[in-house]
Image: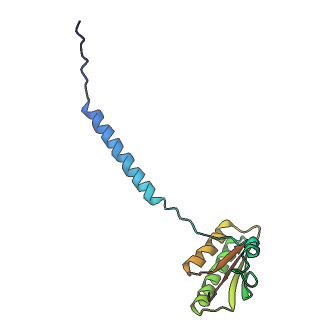
Amino acid sequence: MERKRKKRYYHILDIIVLMCLAFLLYTYNDNHRTSVHQTAIELFWFDWKFIKKYPDIFRGPYPPKRCYIDINLTGEKKSDKTKLDFSQIRLREILSRSDSVNGIHYYFNDSSEYGSFIKALDICRIEQAKTYMPYENNLWVYYTTR
């Protein structure tokens, strides 16, 4: 007994639609992947345990004694933006003069926004500050000769 083979019909229109769909999905995925640019800031949080564990590396008081300009960020957008802009200018002056006497102390209130902390870190990165130390609600930025 001989079996009849079924004829397979491939519709040209179906193949074209599937190819177009695959192309559209590929281009959407490629564009989406390049538009979502995620970055991370490498940050070391200060901990008193390190000073006790490695006393030969960490000498002197922390944060180092300097004449710090206190920047109190309260969560009010306008005043915080003004304070952050001022601190960026001041930090630029400190770093350009290699001033090891002055520094900047950011204090974040409980009502401060997370964005202001990130903006302060961005300022440190933009101005290429090599030494800044976050600790609890504070961020200490200073110039060191080491």
Given residues 137 and 58, the one toward you in this image is: 58
Instruction: Give the colour scheme shown.
Output: rainbow
Residue 110 in percent (x, y) is at: 77, 67
> For the C terminus, which image quadrant?
bottom right
Residue 134 in percent (x, y) is at: 69, 73
Q: Quadrant of residue 135?
A: bottom right
Given residues 26 and 82, the one toward you in this image is: 26
* Horizontal arrangement in the rendering, residue 107 relative to residue 41 (left or right): right
Residue at (42, 51) in percent of width and height: 29
- Judge whether residue 136 can be spotted in this image: no
Residue 124 in percent (x, y) is at: 60, 78
* Horizontal arrangement in the rendering, residue 29 relative to residue 108 (left or right): left
Q: Quadrant of residue 136?
A: bottom right
How many numbered tags mark residues here?
0
Q: Is residue 50 above or below residue 98?
A: above
Q: Quadrant of residue 3?
A: top left
Residue at (75, 71) in percent of width and height: 49
Q: Is residue 35 above or below residue 143?
A: above
> For the N terminus, which image quadrant?
top left
Residue at (52, 62) in percent of width and height: 38
Residue at (24, 33) in percent of width and height: 12
Residue 91 in percent (x, y) is at: 62, 85
